[in-house]
Every structure is written in C-alpha cells, then in structure tokens.
Image (cartoon, rainbow, N blue to C red):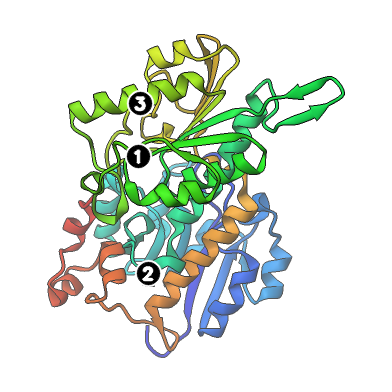
Amino acid sequence: MLGRMLTVAIPRETMPGETRVALIPQTVPALVKAGLAVRVEAGAGEAAGFLDSEYREAGASIAATAAETLAGADVVLKVREPQTLPGGGHEADLIREGALLIGFLNPPANAALFERLAARRIIAFALEKLPRISRAQKMDALSSMSTVAGYKAALLAADALPRFFPLLMTAAGTVAPAKVFVLGAGVAGLQAIATSRRLGAVVSAFDIRPAVREEVQSLGATFVAADQADESHVAAGGYAKELSEEQKTRERELVAKHVQQSDAVITTAVVPGRRAPVLVTAAMVQAMRRGSVIVDLAGESGGNCELTEPGRDVVKHGVMIRSPLNLVAQMPTHASQMYARNVSALLLHLVRDGQLKLDWNDEITRDTCVTRPAEAAASSGAPSAAAAGARS
C-alpha cells in the first residue's frame, strides 16, 4: 500500500433499523488532511441528516452502491458489524482481502463472522474492546453511545409517565415532582440522572461501585447503595463484577425498597459478555404504583427487569416496561457525530504519513484488534487472527 493514497470507505449501514453513519461530513477534512481518500456510499448519511452534497463539499467522493464503495478500499468504517445481505451473500465478502475494518463488531456473538474476516485476512478492530485508558478517551465510542442512550432513556420515561417530572406551582395547587430511580451509574446511568434532574425529577441511583458516589451526588441525586458499595465489586475496566448469591439477595432487598417508592425506574446495568443481571423482579414490579414506568436499557443482553420483553413496550401489573433495542438509532444526528469523532480518532491513531502503521506493541492497537494476519500476530507475540477473534 506504500506509494499510493489509502482509500477509506463508508458504506450505508445494512442492519435493519440502523440510522447512524460511521463518518459525517465535518470529520472528512481531518482524514483528507492526513493523506486519505474518503469514499461514501450514496445516501449513507441521509437517515442521520447528512446529505451526499455535504460529503462532496467536505472532500469525499460518492459511490452509487455498496460494492462500488467497498471495491479496493484499504479501510472500511462501519457502525455495526457486516451483515448477511437481503439479496444473498455477505457484506464482509465485499471488503477486499487484507483491508482494515473498524466498527462495533459485537465480539461475544460473532465468532462465525470473525472466522469469515480472518479467512479474508481482514484486520478488524472492535470498538467494544478499546482499552479504558486516558489515551483512548477520544476514541471511546461505547461511552459516547451510552451518553446518547442515557439521555434518551430519561425522555422515554418522562413521555410514558402519566404525570409531570418537575415540581409545579399552579393555580390548581402544587404538583409534586416525580421520583426517578436509576440502576447503574455508568455513563448511561449518569446521563439518565442528569437529564431526569434537568426535567425536574427527584432522582436516586444505585450502584455497587463506590467510586461513582461523588459523581451521582454532584448531579443532585441521592446515592442509595453506600452501605453495599465496595471496591471488590469492580472488575477490570471499571465494570461491575458478577455478584455472589448472598450479595444479590442483599442488593435485591435494597433495590426493592426504592423501586416501590419510584414513579420511574431506569435500568442500565450490564456485565460485558454475559447476560444482564436481573435487578428488578416480577414481585418488585407488582409492588409498584399503577402508572409507573420502567425503561430497561439492558434489553439487548436480556434485560435488568424480570418482566422485560426486549424490543417491546409491555404493561405488567399496571406498570409500563419499555425495552428499546438500539436506542441510540433514535437520535442518529448527534449519535453519528459523536461516533464519527471517535472512529476518526482511532483511525488516525493507526495512520502515519498517510499509511497504516500498526504497532502491535501499542495497547490501543493490540487490545482493540480482534482479527489480524498470522504473520503480524507472530511477529508481535500476539494471538493469530482466529484466536484473536475468539476473545470476548
């Protein structure tokens, strides 16, 4: 690839319901300045509000089809993993052998995809695997998308709740504010707290990680797990560990009390690579006031509520339980903007003087990669493509 300009391809997303785009016009100039040619499939950004004409003005070229977009491209930027195409065939087979792919690739569920990519010698980087270190913050697409999801979750709760969120002083008397309980104070949870507070609700939050207490309190919410939070519950990367049965029992007792007192419950707890922990049982839902709302952001990994039906809004015991899938796709403009900045930062980390320079001794490059050529793995002491693809 030395001696010629690298081409970066941005195809239209093929996963049903996906409205985001991997690169927006405002992020094209930085790639062009770095010596890269950018090629975008026609209409790729339309669902997110970005027109082909805007990409052209920013310095990108437009290709009519996915095949034309991907043909000969050195780098492919996507939001979601390559899919089986409606007319037959697979999107991964349109990517040239030896190319580099960056996107959300869902490692735990895509062993077969990684085998396909490895067979084509495609070097794939899964943004889910990005190390949580300060150098990688500007590339952290998971946190960006969690911000979008947490914000939208609060709006969904407010929309479904048959009462006001804020305290209101009216001629008809005083209206008390809604009580919102957020389970999990990661990025999504903190944004749900902040948005609910901006809407005027009284907010409390539960988390087993003591480090988030000050963040919760700084947003004006009450941290309710102080007696149970412990550093021993924190896994590598800052995620919560799976709890023992005794710990789960104590947790459920605490959660049950606050769920019963709340008008809206927003759940955000996930354990990477595993089923989401069940934090809200059927009995807890039954004890809630009729008209209350639960927004379960963990639906894609099974749900935090025992009665959640992923992808559906259901009413159980008079309580609305909402579990949207791919919630961030409901806010494609800003979600795409944030994602594009993250993915561009990672790509520019891998590029020097207009060429790909993959340093397998670099923590970001090594840990984010899930398939790589066997010779590259051997020279760095890293696992081969097939082995790397099996990591979760």
Number of numbered labels in the structure image: 3
Q: Which label number is shown at residue 308?
A: none
Q: Is residue 351 above or below residue 23?
A: below
How many angstroms separate mark 2 from mark 1 (CA)? 27 Å
Sort mark 1 into few (<14), some (14-19) or many (20+) by Cα contacts within 10 Å: some
The residue pinned by badge 1 equals 226
Query: Mark 2 belongs to which amino acid?
Result: Ser
The residue pinned by badge 3 equals 254
Q: Secondary structure at mark 1?
A: loop
Sort mark 2 into few (<14), some (14-19) or many (20+) by Cα contacts within 10 Å: few
Specify which label sits upstream in the sequence, 3 or 1.
Answer: 1
Of residues 229 and 358, the one drawn nearer to the viewer in this rendering: 229
Residue 136, image x, y percentages: 38, 68
Residue 186, image x, y percentages: 42, 47
Q: Secondary structure at mark 2?
A: helix
- The reply, left or right, for residue 306 in relation to residue 345 is left
Q: Can residue 299 be seen?
A: yes
Q: Secondary structure at mark 3?
A: helix
The residue pinned by badge 2 equals 134
- The reply, left or right, for residue 159 in relation to residue 389 is right
How many angstroms separate mark 3 from mark 1 (CA)? 11 Å
Query: Mark 3 belongs to which amino acid?
Result: Leu
